[in-house]
Image: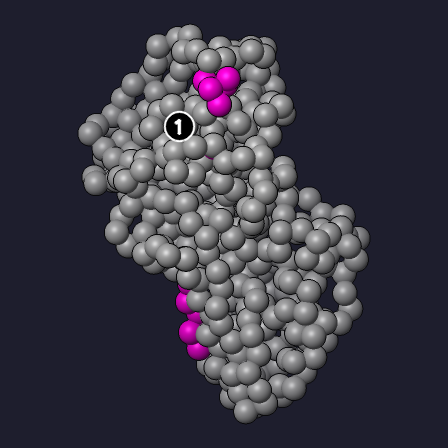
Amino acid sequence: MRIFRRCAAFAAALTLLVAPAAAAAGPAVSYRSFTVQTAHGPAVVYLVTVDLRHAHLGLLHPADVAARATVSAMATAQHARAGVNGDFFNISETHAGIPATGSSVGPEIADGHDLKFAVPDGQRFGPGMPPGATTKIVFGTGEDGRARVASVDLTGAVRSTKGTFDIEGLNQYALPVDGIGVYTHDWGAVSRARAACGTDTSRDAACTTETEEVVVRDGVVTAEAETPGAGDIAPGTVVLLGREKGADELEALDPGDRVDVAARLKAAKVPSLEFAVGGFPILAGGQQVSGLDATTLAPRTAAGASADGRTAYLFAVDGRSPASTGMSVTEVAEQLRAVGAASAVNLDGGGSTTLAYADPGQALTVRNTPSDGTERAVANGIGVFGR
């Protein structure tokens, strides 16, 4: 078994009001907070700048893909110098009797290990994406140590004497219609039933009853069932879950059959990614991506990279209060472009927006003001490691 892996108008409207309120840290990682005056009121911004020649980024994540934790808890546990929340996630559910999994929308890669792939576009949570964007877009760093925005795809198959079947999912809360997904020890104990709910175009569509689940241990089928299961998946074991045509394909397998399961995430036209988190693009080639929301104000989180990929920017802005009205996605893109980013993604915002940072020799603390009043447990985040 192998498991592989965006206006000159806005620039004029955003005027620096207060000099950096906090500065810190060492040659590789720096933090500052400042207020910008917008047409709709003040917005308090928090920014971590990372020199990737002397520090690196990594995925903040709980022990399981289908789990959530606060940014501060994840960053502290992983000994990160700073961190922000990451991708949108399965925070709520409408399917009767099936709980939300807490897992993220897009791909996750941690230390070169493929944790999960992206759900179909119609199954995502979060605001609308700009034209042409998909859930496969990630912000990450490659084997060359440079940060970038890229697209990731999944390749893989189940091979046996009964046939060869394509794999369309890896540890994700929603599978494509007619698809087969692989679930590993990384998923956790949460039920896999949500994966057979909704369609590629509708998150709220009914769950299908055409499912088949096959357990494979050390390359041999050990069990099969007609409904998705739950519970921990032991190391060395994978669970294959098919829906519709994918279920029909898996029904050909019987206990005792030898099978080879191979699935791997691959980034398009860039070096292999060592770290990746999902988000939708807002800057590309130093310009705002077209079609971004310019009106909705909210707390926001985003991440960007310089043109050479040697500098990363982690960005958060408070919102939903008189002290900080938040920003539109277009304004976030302009702010990141102004500080030096050439490419960037929008991450989960609202009550999820969190930026934590540790001064040298001090404990890590949350620097922004989460709009829920306290930190929200989230699916993942971006951590900064090093001085």
Residue with the mark numbered 1: 337
In the image, residue 240 above or below residue 312: below
Report crowding for label 1: few under 14, some 14 to 19, many 20 or more residues within 10 A (C-alpha): many
* Towards the viewer: 41 or 22: 41
What residue is at 40 percent from the left and 15 percent from the top?
34
What residue is at 51 percent from the left and 66 percent from the top?
184
Read off the magenta span. 1-11
- The residue type indicated by label 1 comes to Arg
User: Is any atom of residue 71 visible in this view?
Assistant: no
Give x and y (percent) for residue 52: 26, 40
Image quarter where the N terminus lies is bottom left
What residue is at 47 percent from the left and 32 percent from the top?
288
What residue is at 55 percent from the left and 55 percent from the top?
118
Image quarter where the C terminus lies is top left
Dividing the picture into quadrants, the one containing residue 382 is: top left
Give x and y (percent) for residue 41: 56, 10
User: Is any atom of residue 41 visible in this view?
Assistant: yes
In the image, residue 364 above or below residue 224: above
In the image, residue 24 above or below residue 159: above
Dividing the picture into quadrants, the one containing residue 139 is: top left
Give x and y (percent) for residue 44: 47, 17
Is residue 312 part of the magenta span, yes or no? no
In the image, residue 386 above or below residue 109: above
Judged left or right of residue 242, residue 61 is left
Total numbered labels:
1
Callout 1: helix, strand or loop? helix
Dividing the picture into quadrants, the one containing residue 365 is: top left
Give x and y (percent) for residue 272: 34, 58
* Towards the viewer: 177 or 206: 177
Q: Tell me, what colour scheme is on the image?
A: one colour
Judged left or right of residue 58, residue 170 is right
Is residue 3 part of the magenta span, yes or no? yes
